[in-house]
Amino acid sequence: MPMVAGLTPAALLLGWAVILATIVSSPWPQIVIVAITTTVFALFLATTVLRRLLRRTRLLLLTVLLLFGWMTPGMPISGLPGATGDGLLQGVEQLSRLLVSLSMVALLLEYMPTERLLVACHVLLRPLGYLRLDVDRFILRLALTLRQIDKSGEEFAPSISLQVPD
């Protein structure tokens, strides 16, 4: 990947993190619009990565919506037993934050190779060495984890066939 405007991988990763933190802290109506926009944008630019991330986190996304929608006190919604309007609004808001995060991660993984991502993490985490934290060990573990995740995504293809009796 060529450097964008002469930026190093560490500068790109830091800029990505600042943009993500800014977007995720947006208030209620804006975060939903940004989530839709970011998700559509990522679907066009990082289709396979985003689909894989959404497939792996679909239960988390559903759980967040259900927990907020049905466990938050508020005015009940007719037609949805146990659900509250406040809870569903908060659920959609948190779901939007997760979708923005997943879309941004998909774009990062699509356009920044793993090696550059690891270099960027190493550069940004190097100051933690002054606190006697082993940054090299952390980066090695991160590299092994990322490699295993890439392998598991390719190897894991469950073959469950449901047969309907005649």
Image: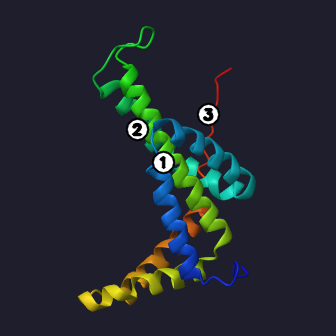
Quick one: label 2, few (<14), some, or many (20+) residues within 10 Å? some
Quadrant of the frame with the C terminus: top right
Q: Residue at x 41, y 79 (%)?
A: 141
The CA span between labels 1 and 3 is: 32 Å
Check disc 1 and give the amino acid type: Leu
Residue beneath disc 3: 162
Quick one: label 1, few (<14), some, or many (20+) residues within 10 Å? some
Q: Give the structural element (helix, strand or loop) at label 2.
A: helix
N-term-proximal mark, 2 vs 1: 2
Q: In this view, does 124 lie above or below 41?
A: below
> Is there a contact, CB below 8 Å, between mark 2 and mark 1?
yes
Quick one: label 3, few (<14), some, or many (20+) residues within 10 Å? few
Query: Of the residues tagged 1 and 3, which is closer to the observer?
Result: 1
Most distant residue in the left direction: 131
The CA span between labels 2 and 1 is: 9 Å
Residue 67 image position (x, y, % from top left)? 35, 32
Residue beneath disc 2: 64
143 and 70: which is toward the camera: 70
Horizontally, is 25 left or right of 105 in the view? left
Q: Is residue 141 above or below residue 62?
A: below
The CA span between labels 3 and 2 is: 29 Å
Check disc 3 and give the amino acid type: Leu
Residue beneath disc 1: 98
Quadrant of the frame with the N terminus: bottom right
Q: Which residue is drawn at 73% across and 81% down?
A: 2
Horizontally, is 27 left or right of 108 in the view? left
Query: Of the residues tagged 3 and 2, which is closer to the observer?
Result: 2
Q: In this view, does 81 lie above or below 14?
A: above
**Number of marks drawn:** 3
